[in-house]
Amino acid sequence: MASISGAARNEHYAATKGGLNAMSYALAVEFGRYGITSNIIQPGWIATDMTEGLMANEKFAANAGKRIPLRRWGQPSDFGGLAVYLLSDASAYHTGQDFLIDGGYWRF
C-alpha cells in the first residue's frame, strides 16, 4: 500500500514501490503486442515476518484493525487464487492492472 498511500518516515520504501508500479504499467504497454501481460499484486496488512513487529504492537494493531472492513490481517494464502488467475490463460487479456489485496482497508 505504500506505493499508493505513502509511508511516513519510510519514504524511500514507498518510492521504490511506486517505481515498480510505473515499470509494470510501462511493461504492459511495451510488451502487450507480444502477448506478454504485466500486472501488480499490492498487499495490504499481511501477517508475515516483515509485519510481525507491527502486529505485536497492540496499539498499532488495534488501530489498523479498525480500518480493515474484513476485521483481520491478511494471510499469505489470501493471494493464491489471484496468483493462479494471473498465471493462467484466463487472464490473457488482463494487463496493466494493479490488484490491491487489503481486506478493504484502502476503501475505508
Image: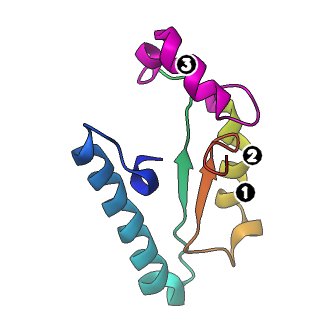
- Quick one: which residue is furthest to the bottom in this view? 33
Q: Amino acid at mark 3?
A: Ala
Q: CA distance from mark 1 to mark 2?
A: 6 Å
Residue 77 rendering spot, x and y as whole percentages:
68, 31
Q: Amino acid at mark 2?
A: Gly
Give the quadrant of residue 19: bottom left
Residue 103 rendering spot, x and y as whole percentages:
70, 40
- For disc 1, the marked residue is 85
User: In the rendered image of this protein, does residue 46 appear above or below residue 10?
Assistant: above
* Residues in magenta, as a range: 49-76
Element on which disc 2 rests? helix
Q: CA distance from mark 3 to mark 1?
A: 31 Å
Which residue shows up at 76% across the image and 33% down it?
70
Which residue shows up at 41% across the image and 24% down it?
50
Q: Earlier in the sequence, mark 2 or mark 3?
A: 3
- For disc 2, the marked residue is 81
User: In the rendered image of this protein, does residue 32 appear above or below residue 66?
Assistant: below
Give the quadrant of residue 94: bottom right
**Of marks 2 and 3, the one in the foreground:** 3
User: In the rendered image of this protein, does residue 64 appear above or below residue 57?
Assistant: below
Label 1 close to label 2 by CB (< 8 Å)? yes
Left or right: where does residue 53 sit relative to residue 106? left
Element on which disc 1 rests? helix
* Residue 56 - label: none
**Of marks 3 and 1, the one in the foreground:** 3
Q: How many marks?
A: 3
Residue 52 rendering spot, x and y as whole percentages:
46, 15
Left or right: where does residue 83 sit relative to residue 13? right
Is residue 55 visible to the viewer in this orientation of the structure?
Answer: no
- For disc 3, the marked residue is 61
Q: CA distance from mark 2 to mark 3?
A: 26 Å
